[in-house]
Every structure is written in C-alpha cells, then in structure tokens.
Image (cartoon, grey):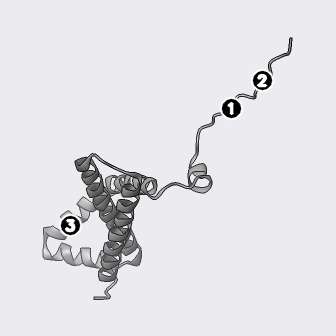
Amino acid sequence: MAEAVRKPRPEFRNIGLGDITMTYRLPLAAKVSILHRVSGALLFLFLPFLLYLFDRSLTSELSFEVFKAFLSNIVVKLITLVLAWAFLFHFCAGIRHLLMDLHHSVTKEGGRQTSLVVFVVSSVLTIAFALKLFGAF
C-alpha cells in the first residue's frame, strides 16, 4: 500500500504593522478605514489639549492674546495642522460611512470612488486651512 503524501501544514502568523504597510497592497477603501481610526484616535488623545486651548481663548482678551502668541510658534502650528487634518479627514470619512449605511448597496467600485472623494475633499480642506494658518490669506 502506498503511503499518503503529507502536505506541509500552512503556517499562520499574526500580521504586524510592517506586513500591512510594506507587504500587502491595500485597496483605497481599506486605507481610508485605517486612517479614519487613526484620525479618531488622534482627536480623542488631544481632546483635553484642545479643550484647554479653547477655554484659554475665551476667558478674557488678555488670555486670547496669550493664546495668539502661543499659536505663533511653528511647532504649535504644525500640531494644529495635524489636528485639523485629523478632524477634517475623520469628518469626511464619517459622512462616507453614514452614506454607505444609508444606501445599503456598497460595491467595490463605489467604495473606491467614495474613498477617493474623501481623500480629495479632506486634502483640499486641509490645504486651505494650512494656507490660512500660515498667513497666505
């Protein structure tokens, strides 16, 4: 009797961040989904900082002047720009998710197109915010 040929069992490993970013080519919809989570986490982590700045800016005229001086620092401007991107991207991606839930018929092509719209709209809004923040207009 012939012995059965045994195939080697497949080896399953946990997928790390390096595998996701370097090995696999994710579709655009997956990138938007991941960035939606990242932007939400950034907003959550920086919420106490944002609320403190908001409180300081509304307390008095003097505290508003201190706030303006604090915001003139380039590092603070860059942090503000990153937080503005996080808010705008999270907002646009959230609207995308609400529209997808509303229509109940999500296709692969529709997901790609709406992901592209989210990237374009949030990028244009972030660039407009950056131009205003750095004094272009």
The single residue placed furthest to the top in the displayed view is 1
Judging depth in this view, the residue of 4 and 38 nearest the camera is 4
Give the alpha-carbon distance from disc 2 to disc 1, as whole Å.
12 Å
- From the image, tell me which residue sits under label 1: 10
Q: Which mark is residue 6?
A: 2
**Snapshot quadrant of residue 71:** bottom left
Is residue 48 at least partly visible in the picture?
Answer: no
Q: Residue at x 19, y 70 (%)?
A: 57
Secondary structure of the residue carrying tag 3 is: helix
Give the alpha-carbon distance from disc 3 to disc 1, as whole Å.
58 Å
Q: Is residue 43 left or right of residue 32?
A: left
Quadrant showing the C terminus: bottom left
Judging depth in this view, the residue of 79 and 15 nearest the camera is 15
Tag 3: residue type? Arg
Where is residue 47? Give x, y as percent: 29, 56
Nearer mark to the viewer, of 3 and 1: 1
- From the image, tell me which residue sits under label 3: 56
Q: Residue at x 39, y 65 (%)?
A: 116
Is residue 109 at least partly visible in the picture?
Answer: yes
The single residue placed furthest to the front in the displayed view is 1
**Snapshot quadrant of residue 136:** bottom left
Where is residue 124? Give x, y as percent: 34, 75
Q: Which mark is residue 38?
A: none
Nearer mark to the viewer, of 2 and 1: 2
**Snapshot quadrant of residue 72:** bottom left
Which of pointers 3 and 1 lies earlier in the amino acid sequence? 1
User: For the residue carrying disc 1, how many other residues have a C-alpha within 10 Å: few (<14), some (14-19), or many (20+)?
Assistant: few
